[in-house]
Amino acid sequence: SGSSACKSWCDSAAPEDCAPMGAAASDNALCKQTIQRWYAGGCWGCINVCTGNCLDKEDADNIRIRLGDQQYYWCGDVWRDYIFHVANEHPLFGILFCHPLHPYTKLERFSLEWLRWTATISWIVLFRQQLKLEHIKHGESPDGDWKDMVRLFFHVSLPIMAVQNLLETMARASGRPDGCLERCCGKFLLRVFQWALIFMWYCSSAYMMYWSYVVIAVPGPWNEEGKDCMSLESMAYWTKVSLIQDYFTWFLQDMLVPVPIFGCPPRFGFRGKWRKEAEEQKPSLIEWLSSSLSSGSCSSSEDDGCCERSRR
């Protein structure tokens, strides 16, 4: 289990790896320890079993902020960082494997993904059938044309994307220690407002699910007394296939789309942003090393005797 993996990791780790994170020499060390503990099974919340009292509030807040900012550079190994990135950002894998300190929690991810599925399938079935009935009423072809696809995008896909992005933005903001929404509204009030919106969206999805089931399964004038049942079931099936394909196309988008989109110069995909963050980490690491060396060496005239003795 993840709990036993965490314990075995701490049993076999070097003493400095299980030292309190607050004593870490730099943010770079904190990030590396975070990756190590997550790979040891921390994705299921047993990070507390692994670290014991290692994780103080300041370090936990720093991890939450980095995760909330969608930082890509953590341990310096591009493949380990990429797996960690996929586990925290993929719409499906994130439900199972995201870091327990991530502001966008597993419960929030599962809720919003379930809403996306139910709302998309139900809304498309209802809207396409409504379009077909309108075409029949006006003596037009029931199959429609390209204009129906445009209307489908603006009346179904775009609103669902907007609601999804709004709820996801609120979920990511509600768990950030330095979030502006949390500072303005308060943590409790923000949580209440967030889950109130999710509950309203749940009710709307349940309502659409009920009527889409009626349209598909119950013969009536809305489906030409059952003649359209097969075509509506096929429409729902291919909508599900399209949603499943989104889980695979996510990897392509993650590798090719600039992050941020309007960045200058553009950094394409995960690797581009990872390299940029790696370049930004080097100066701070060099500064830390130089300060450590200077603090460890003999300095000024009062240490001349120490230096002389050490040279002897």
Image (cartoon, rainbow, N blue to C red):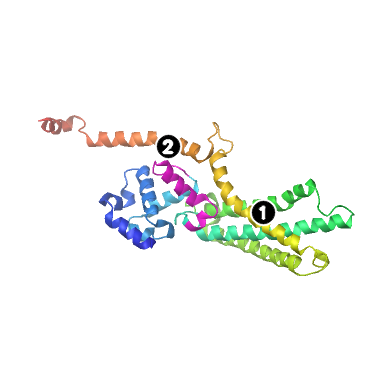
Q: Can you say which quadrant of the picture contains the C terminus?
A: top left
Q: What is the secondary structure assignment of the residue under circle 1? A: helix
Residue with the most extreme bottom position = 218
Q: What is the secondary structure assignment of the residue under circle 2? A: helix
On screen, 66 above or below 97? above
Q: Can you say which quadrant of the picture contains the N terminus?
A: bottom left
**Residue 192 appears left or right of 34:** right
Contact between marks 1 and 2 (CB within 8 A): the answer is no
Earlier in the chain: of badge 1 and badge 2, it is 1
Q: From the image, tell me which residue sits under label 2.
A: 278
Question: Residue 276 at what x, y percent from top left?
Answer: 47, 35
Where on the picture, by quarter, is residue 237?
A: bottom right
Q: Nearer the viewer, residue 79 or 285?
A: 79
Question: Residue 171 at what x, y percent from top left?
Answer: 55, 55
How many discs appear? 2
Q: Amino acid at mark 2?
A: Ala
| Magenta stretch, main secondary structure class | helix
| Distance between mark 1 and mark 2 Cα atoms | 36 Å
The residue located at (30%, 33%) in the rendering is: 290
Find the magenta span and give its range: 71-96
Residue 73's tag is none
Q: From the image, tell me which residue sits under label 1.
A: 160
Q: Amino acid at mark 1?
A: Ile
- Residue 288, magenta (yes or no): no
Would you say residue 272 is visible in this rendering?
yes
